[in-house]
């Protein structure tokens, strides 16, 4: 079998287009422009590239981008004060504090200080709890993107055997909750799981969020299954260069799986598209408007 390649770039572009249309309607009908504040502390080059890309896409979707860059020496109190200021600013509908933060700042305290209604990353304990309780919530962007990609293949995920490898608060746990909400039967595997290959071979839907280059081999995948690869791993390449690979051994998996996301070009582009969607949803909710139909 040769897997269908799930084109995250195209699916993300389509989602961004729908969000943009909805943003234009919001301006035309209500005079509203959703705004997102992205806060970056310190000089992490990877985060800087990511934040720049986010701001560009936010602007391209017709939204207002508010970038706040703070020095690496910023104290927890200073960052809390900025979060308080953004919470109170009506122009700001979404707040994203780029992680990781410098060691003098407790990221849990910062996340808990964000107004849950503006928590477009979906990391605030209130949104985490609402998702776990099956209530409407702002949900984390990468997990939401994973579920959308899986649904682009299957429509409904009801009754599917899903295995999620990874139990982080950012990917593994929320993606498992979202799959449960889609009525999949969900198993969460992690670094202490026994006989991971055998467990994975049972999965109709395998989500790899590990952070280990090409750890999931072709013979871990049930023939015809769908594999969603969240991993972003930089490995050495020819000529002293480097390249990005996922957590799934792509060529091996493509020979066995029914559908597979590439890295790059799979889950990655969905993350920012879902951030735009969350910002639009947050803006509508804050103005007492119905959930946008996307
Ligand atoms: P993390 O380090 O917080 O969590 C990794 C998880 O993998 C842990 O729960 C751990 O138990 C599990 N794990 C580690 N080694 C294992 C092993 N040998 N067997 C089984 N499980 C094992 O990482 P994270 O933040 O969840 O990110 C995971 C990957 O996804 C990383 O490569 C990260 O860069 C990538 N990521 C991509 C996006 C995106 O937009 N595409 C977003 C977030 C994270």
Image (cartoon, rainbow, N blue to C red):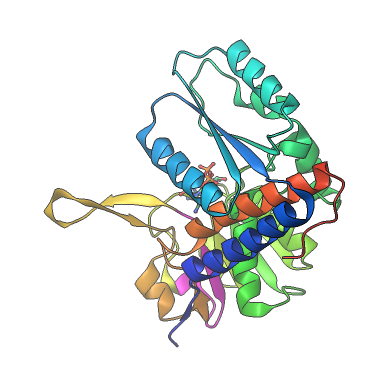
Tag count in the figure? 0
Q: Give the extent of the magenta segment.
A: 219-231
**Which residue ends up furthest to the left in the rendered image?**
239
Query: Which residue is rendered at x = 78% and y = 56% of the image?
Result: 29
Can residue 204 be seen by looking at this rendering? no
Q: Where, by quadrant of the figure, is residue 105 drawn? A: top right
Residue 135 vertical placement versus 294 (above, below): above
> Could you say which is closer to the camera, residue 146 or residue 292?
292
Query: Which residue is rendered at x = 69% and y = 43% of the image?
Result: 122
The picture places residue 229, in percent across and down from the top left corner, at 49, 62
Query: Which residue is rendered at x = 54% and y = 64% of the image?
Result: 12
Q: Where, by quadrant of the figure, is residue 19 drawn? A: bottom right
Does the magenta-highlighted stretch encompass residue 164?
no
> Could you say which is closer to the camera, residue 94 or residue 159?
94
> Could you say which is closer to the camera, residue 238 or residue 80?
80
**Which residue ends up furthest to the bottom in the rendered image?**
1
Residue 6 vertical placement versus 96 (above, below): below
The picture places residue 291, in percent across and down from the top left corner, at 81, 57
Residue 147 vertical placement versus 219 (above, below): above
Q: Is residue 154 left or right of residue 39?
A: right
The picture places residue 231, in percent across and down from the top left corner, at 46, 54
The picture places residue 94, in percent across and down from the top left corner, at 67, 39
């Amino acid at each position: 079998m040769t897997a269908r390649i799930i084109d995250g770039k195209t699916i993300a572009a389509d989602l961004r287009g729908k969000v943009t249309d909805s943003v234009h309607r919001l301006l035309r009908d209500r005079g509203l422009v959703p705004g997102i504040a992205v806060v970056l502390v310190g000089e992490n080059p990877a985060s800087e590239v990511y934040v720049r890309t986010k701001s560009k896409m936010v602007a391209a979707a017709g939204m207002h981008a508010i970038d706040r860059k703070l020095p690496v020496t910023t104290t927890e109190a200073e960052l809390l004060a900025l979060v308080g200021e953004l919470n109170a600013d009506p122009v700001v509908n979404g707040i994203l504090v780029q992680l990781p933060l410098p060691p003098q700042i407790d990221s849990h305290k910062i996340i808990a200080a964000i107004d849950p209604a503006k928590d477009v990353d979906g990391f605030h304990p209130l949104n985490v709890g609402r998702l776990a309780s099956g209530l409407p919530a702002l949900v984390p962007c990468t997990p939401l993107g994973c579920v959308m990609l899986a649904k682009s293949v299957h429509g409904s995920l009801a009754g599917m055997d899903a295995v999620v490898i990874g139990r982080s608060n950012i990917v593994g746990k929320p993606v498992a909750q979202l799959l449960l909400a889609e009525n999949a039967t969900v198993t969460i595997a992690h670094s202490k799981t026994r006989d991971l290959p055998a467990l994975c071979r049972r999965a109709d839907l395998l989500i790899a969020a590990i952070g280990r280059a090409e750890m999931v081999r072709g013979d871990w995948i049930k023939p015809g299954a769908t594999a969603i690869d969240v991993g972003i791993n930089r490995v050495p390449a020819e000529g002293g260069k480097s390249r990005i690979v996922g957590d799934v051994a792509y060529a091996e998996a493509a020979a066995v799986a029914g559908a597979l996301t590439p890295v790059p070009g799979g889950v990655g582009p969905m993350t920012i598209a879902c951030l735009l969607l969350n910002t639009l949803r947050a803006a509508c909710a804050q103005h007492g408007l119905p959930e946008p139909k996307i």
